Amino acid sequence: MSLLQTVLAFLVALAVLVVVHELGHYWVARWCGVKVLRFSVGMGKIVWSRRFGPDQTEWALSMLPFGGYVKMLDAREQDISTMPPEDLKREFTRQSVWKRIAIVAAGPLANFLLAIAVFAGLYTYGMPEPTARIREVPTASAAYEAGLRGGELVTAINGETVRNWSDMRWKVLQHALERNPVRLEVQRPDPVDPKVTLNESVSLRLDGLQTADLEGDFLAKLGLDLARPKAVLGRIVEDGPANRAGLREGDQIMAVDGKPVSDGLAFIEIVRKSPEQMLRLTGIRNGQEFSATVTPEAFSRNNETVGRIKVEVPLAPEMVTAGDAPVAALGRAVAKTWDTSVLTLKMLGKMLIGEVSLKNITGPITIADYAGQTARIGIISYLTFIAFISISLGVMNLLPIPVLDGGLLLYYSLELLTGRALPERFGEMAQRAGVGILMTLMAVAVFNDIVRLMS
């Protein structure tokens, strides 16, 4: 069932992205007066088609469910010698270079507009997100050096408002690429009177990050982690170690073997590392201090032996949901799409100069896996996934590689500068080179996908 859901989620996302991209080409081609012969979802042999509209455009589904295309009346592909004059006027190569640029650029632009529309809708609706509250900070970390200790709520970075944890992560990542320090505005409880909130500013250095760190959980490298709730016990399984030790639902664990426990995740980590070892617990029950001893039973998982006491420990972080007015949401959506596009280009540039590993190139298998995962989480995560993939598709198609939209835009830009079209032979050679580049990138992507599956 999980595999079927993954496949369906991937195919739906792919169909949406392809249709939107090709509709961009189609609508602008029609607006520019170019005759469209076929609109195909998928590549290869046509398995279903129907003709509609005044031009009897063929709308088709093709065998290979990867990509799609809009086939226009084009003298380079069809014999136009017997066509009536009214059709010749609508032939693609006879249009002005500006119209050809508009038609080619419309596909990637449609992908960006889709992302903006999705983000704007989500921002208007309001997405539940963990707050940007920081967990206890390790002493040997950049965050500790900056003065953070844990429990702080980050409200702004370099003067830009931080709404939630993912917002904070995104803003830090943008500066981490350049290794520039960031200034965090935080709220923290007064150590003298916890009911009083202090507003402070700290400078977090990012120059200790390595390029490889950006490919994983770079916030953890800085000592930043998402705050978790206190170690309050939930449902306790009968005949488990916790039940035999006399622990009760609602107990808050304050210390283990005399060492303070910061939160529920810290308690779970201690238990996992202590199979068959007696632990002395100190906690609070109904406002009164209590103590107990428990011995986690050994449990084998993924060739690793860990401890467990068979009790639920809720770990859901503090959440916030805030919807924007439609105009504000649209502005945030445009900014998010722009920032994501710029970040994607920066990462590609660092790949070219060797600062970022080619292992970050993902192929259809990994994308399908992400589609399935986000679909299982919920519609908001799935729509967010589609928005990000749409941006990536738009950016990739604008790269100046022959056979991609960006390659055609490069041709037409040179035509604008020189006043004449590029020689046909040059175009054919560039097309072959472009196919070679794409095949190489696809091979790297599939190889990375297989390595991820095996690991």
Image (spheres, grey):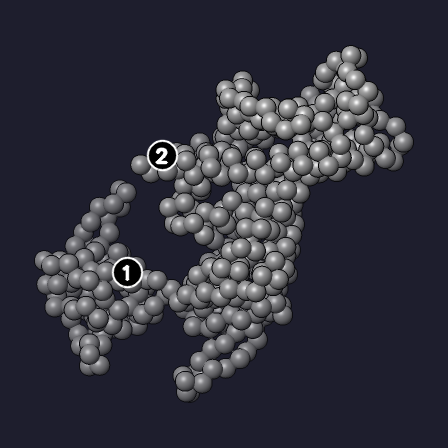
Residue 440 place in picture, x, y as percent: 59, 27
Q: Residue at x 78, y 12 (%)?
A: 82
Q: Mark 1–mark 2 contact, CB under 8 Å?
A: no
Task: Name the element at disc 2.
Answer: helix
Image position of 303 (left or right of 370): left
Q: Position of residue 188 (x, y in %)?
A: 47, 77
Residue with the most extreme front position: 54
> Where residue 324 sits: x, y (%)?
55, 64
**295 sits left or right of 351 in the view:** left
Q: To which residue does mark 2 refer?
A: 4
> The disc labelled 1 sits on which kind of residue?
Ile
**Total numbered labels placed on residues in the image:** 2
Determine which quarter of the picture holds residue 258: bottom left
Q: Residue at x 31, y 36 (%)?
A: 1
> Which amino acid is tagged 2?
Leu
Q: Residue 408, how many percent across, how many down?
A: 74, 31
Mark 1 vs mark 2: give the one in front. Answer: 2
Q: Nearer the viewer, residue 13 or 447?
A: 13
The answer, for residue 283, to whether it is visible in the render is yes
Residue that appears at 19% across and 65% down: 279
Return the mark for residue 268: 1
